[in-house]
Amino acid sequence: MFDDRWEVTPPLADEAFGHIPAKRGVLLLADATDRPITMITAGDLRARLRTRLADNDTDQPRRQADLRHITRTVLWTLTHSHFETDWAYLELARAVWPKRYATMLAWKRPWFVHVNCDEAFPHFVRSRDVQAAPGRYVGPFPSGRWAEQFIQGLQDAFDLCRDIKCLRTSPAGPPCSYGQMGRCLSPCDGTISMDAYRQVVRRAADFAAGSRREFRDNLQRRMSTASEDLAFEKAASLKTKLHRLEAFDRSEYMFAAPAEAFRYLLIQRGPNARTAKTFFVNGAAILAGPELAYPLVDDALADVGRRMSAFVGPASTSDEAGAWRIGLVGRYLFSSADRRGVIVPWRESLTAAEIAEAIETAVDILKLRAPKRRKRASSSQAQPGK
C-alpha cells in the first residue's frame, strides 16, 4: 500500500528526518506493534512529520506530545497533486480503518437531484444517496442549497407542484396559492390528471438532464404566437419563464448531468515539469491512467483516449466507498483552478486534439514546461581552426 517506511528510534535529532522525502504525499504513523495511530496528508512530508514528532521545548498540544512518544514506524506514499493526494488518502484510510474511514474524510457525499417519474406522486428532491432509489439522478451540485435552487427553477419553468403534501391530496385536494396565480398545474384539485402531470414531470426530468433546447425553442415559439395574437399578458408570462431559464446556465449547474454520465478525464500535475498524470473516472470508480510527457505527443494522447474508452465501457460497479469517490471528484469539479487541475467531461467523440487543447490552456496550473532549446554553436565555435 505504501511506497516506503522508516523505523523511528528516539530521541530524534533534526537530521534524522532526512529519511523522509520533502515531497507531497500521505503519511501513516504506527506504534511499536505496527498498530496505526494516525494518517495525514502534506505538501512536504518531511516538514509535516518534523512538526508532529520533533522534540521541542515549547509547549505543544498533548496530541503532538503523545505522537512523539509512541510513534515507532512511519510509512508514506508519494503523490503529485491535490487530487491524487486526496484519492490516495481515501483508499489508504479505507484499507487501514475500513469501519471508520468515512469519518476521517475532509469532504462529504455529493448532492444530486432525484425524481422517480413512475411513483404515485412524482416530485423532485435533493439527495446524497446516489442510485439508492429507482428513478433519475442529476448532478452533482456544489451544495444542497444549489440543488434546492435547481429544483425551484424546474418548478418555475414547468409549473410543478411545490408541496408534496399538497400533491398527495390529488385529485380531491383544495387548489394551492400557486395554482390560483397560474403558476402550478394544480394536480391537487384535479385540474390536470396525474397521468398528464407525470408526463410534464418527465419533460422536466429530460430538461434537467440536459435536453433543454427543445423546451426553450417551444417557449420562444409560444411567446411569439401569443404576441401575434395580441395576447400580451400570456406573452409576458412566457417571456418571464424564458428569462428564468437563464439561471440554468450558471456555473453552479455546469456539471449537472445524469448520474450514469458521471465520467471524467482528469489531468493533474506529475512528478516534474515534463510530465502530467491522468486519472479516469467512471461513476464510482477511479483508475490511474498513463503519464503524459510534455511536449505532448499525438500517439500518447490517443492512447489515453483509448484506455479511457475501455474503462468506461462496462457499467461502473460500486462498493461502499463509491459515494465518497464521487464526492471527491465532485469536490474538485467545484474547486479553484489551481487545485482542480484539468477535468474534461468524457464523451466517446473526444479527440486527442481536444485533450491537448485542454492541457495546453492549463500548462501553468499543471506546472508544465517544455525543455529549453539548445543554443546553436557559433561559426567560430563550430570551426575552431578558422
Image (cartoon, rainbow, N blue to C red):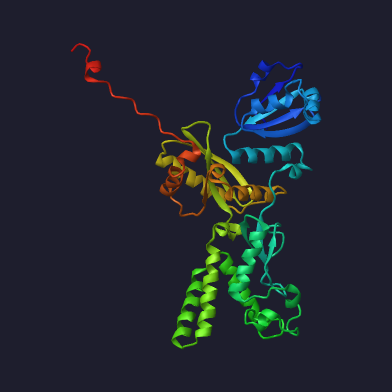
**x, y percentage for residue 382?**
24, 17
Report the quarter where the C terminus lies: top left
Residue 33 versus residue 209 in the image, above or below: above
Q: Nearer the viewer, residue 295 or 306?
A: 295
Q: Nearer the viewer, residue 109 or 179?
A: 179
User: Does the rendering let one see residue 211?
Assistant: no
Question: Image check: 170 left or right of 370?
Answer: right
Q: Residue furthest left?
A: 386
Q: Residue furthest front?
A: 58
User: Does the rendering let one see residue 268?
Assistant: yes
Report the quarter where the N terminus lies: top right
**x, y percentage for residue 37?**
78, 31
**x, y percentage for residue 359?**
46, 43
**x, y percentage for residue 9?**
75, 17
**How many numbered dots are placed on residues in this image?**
0
Residue 50 versus residue 139 in the image, above or below: above
Q: Nearer the viewer, residue 86 or 98?
A: 86
Residue 67 versus residue 124 in the image, above or below: above
Report the residue at 48% width, 84% height from top: 226
Question: Image check: 258 left or right of 231?
Answer: right
Residue 234 versus residue 118 in the image, above or below: below
